[in-house]
Image (cartoon, helix red, strand yellow):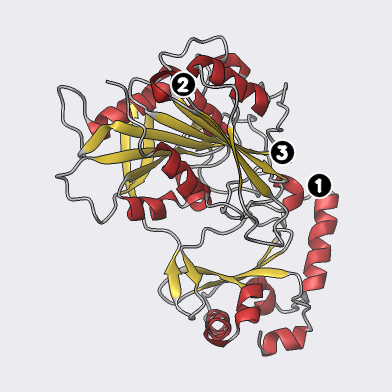
Amino acid sequence: MGSVDKELRTDLSQLKYVFFSTNDEHLVRADYGKAVATGGAMLAGLQQGYADALSSSSGAVYFQDSMGFMYDWGKNVRSGAPVDWDQMRSEMMAALTAGDFSKLIPSYPFDRYLKEDGSLGIASYPLQHGSLELDGLTRNYYYYVPSSYDGKTPVPLVFSFHGIHSSGYGQQSLTKLEILAEKEGFIVVYPDGQPIPEGVGILQDSSMIVGYQGLWNFTDFGISDLNFVSVLIDKLAGTDTTAGEFNIDRSRIYATGMSNGGIFSHKLAIELSDKIAAVACVTGPLAKVLTDKVPARPITVIQASGDADPILPWNGNDTLGTLSVDDTIAWWKKVNRTSETPVVEEYPVTVPDDPTRVTKYTYSGGINNTKVILYKISQMGHTWPMGPQYLPIPLIGNVCHQIDLNQAIWNDIKDVRLPK
């Protein structure tokens, strides 16, 4: 990719993505294999962006390999004794084998991507910040308002809840739902969960994930995140007697979530269905503690999970207190009284080197036309389909690139309305 690589005799056969910064402070993700195969303007754009970033004293260049490991290539090149990529990979694998995560770099939140014509596409939009005081905490949230919003026509509202150890910004980096919000004309909100208590959580090594780390409380004990969401809905969308900050179609408020945020979305479906029309839970199945509750009403529920998830396994996790995905679907089918026989759709393979496969099961005919929908994704790990490989495959499993889950979920819920 340049004279620097020739000098270091780097083997780039396992390189998947190149991340490079721009002079106007964007971070670009370039598909290295596609650029090499396409050639022309795309390869030239990658080479120029890479060279410009390395020539700048503040420029950043990262490599990500096919296993999802990230490498600070810019720092390596600028060091007094740079090494080739094979040595960097060997050192990282040796450290991980020894239980040392200090060399592990999470995938960076890029906001641009390199297109085939060599230009840059928008991968995410800047968010606005809001907050409210509740239960002795300052509760923060981040949101995107589409450019089509004029304040005159009511628009849908979509919440996206992060997983444990993450944040609103982390969820944006994972899902990039604001791109869909701009296209489809809804407002998307990424709230921060409550701070993780010391010693709680899956990852105790602070070097793996930096910045704010939160969680969503799906129990009835402690600070109520359900109350936070209810108050936030009233603030944004208004009530029968008060105006909200935006002109929201209050019959079209939806919740999505990843992992702990997906489990929390199940709680919202059970206990806040007077304000939320439908939920989509990704990698987060139903918690056992929630199964003793009686849902306020039938509600459309979507579950998307991988059968190779090492964090919240398909067959459930007794330690974490989650049901299996199959039992989650069975529970909601009983609540909604849907059909027992699903409509089955096999998604085509669009990315040959992606081992994941997608099958959609739709159980319809529920009370008030509710549905229960399952996206079963074989060989997918604890990831968001089409999202980034935010940690290496050996730790979280594969990302699925066979389906645009954001668009699929929106197509499933956009016509669902809150019952009058």
Left or right position of 276 against 91: left
**Sooner in the amino-acid sequence: mark 3 or mark 2:** 3
Left or right position of 135 against 197: left
| Distance from the alpha carbon under mark 2 to that under mark 1 | 49 Å
Name which residue type carries label 2. Gly
**Sooner in the amino-acid sequence: mark 2 or mark 1:** 1
Q: Nearer the viewer, residue 122 or 194?
A: 122
Q: Is residue 87 above or below residue 310?
A: below
Label ID, residue 366: 2
| Distance from the alpha carbon under mark 3 to that under mark 2 | 26 Å
Please give the residue where the numbered disc 1 appears in the rendered image: 99
Q: Position of residue 326 (x, y in %)?
A: 66, 26
The quadrant in which the C terminus is found is: top left
- Circles 1 and 3, Cβ within 8 Å, touching? The answer is no
User: Mark 2 or mark 1: which is in front?
Assistant: 2
Q: Nearer the viewer, residue 49 or 305?
A: 305
Whether residue 11 appears in this view of the structure is: yes
Name which residue type carries label 3. Asp
- Which residue lies at the image location 46% right of the left edge and 18% below the top edge? 270
- Which residue lies at the image location 43% right of the left edge and 18% below the top edge? 367
Give the secondary structure at mark 2.
loop
- Which residue lies at the image location 76% right of the left edge and 78% below the top edge? 81
**Sooner in the amino-acid sequence: mark 1 or mark 3:** 1
Circle 2 residues within 10 Å: few <14, some 14–19, many ≥20: some
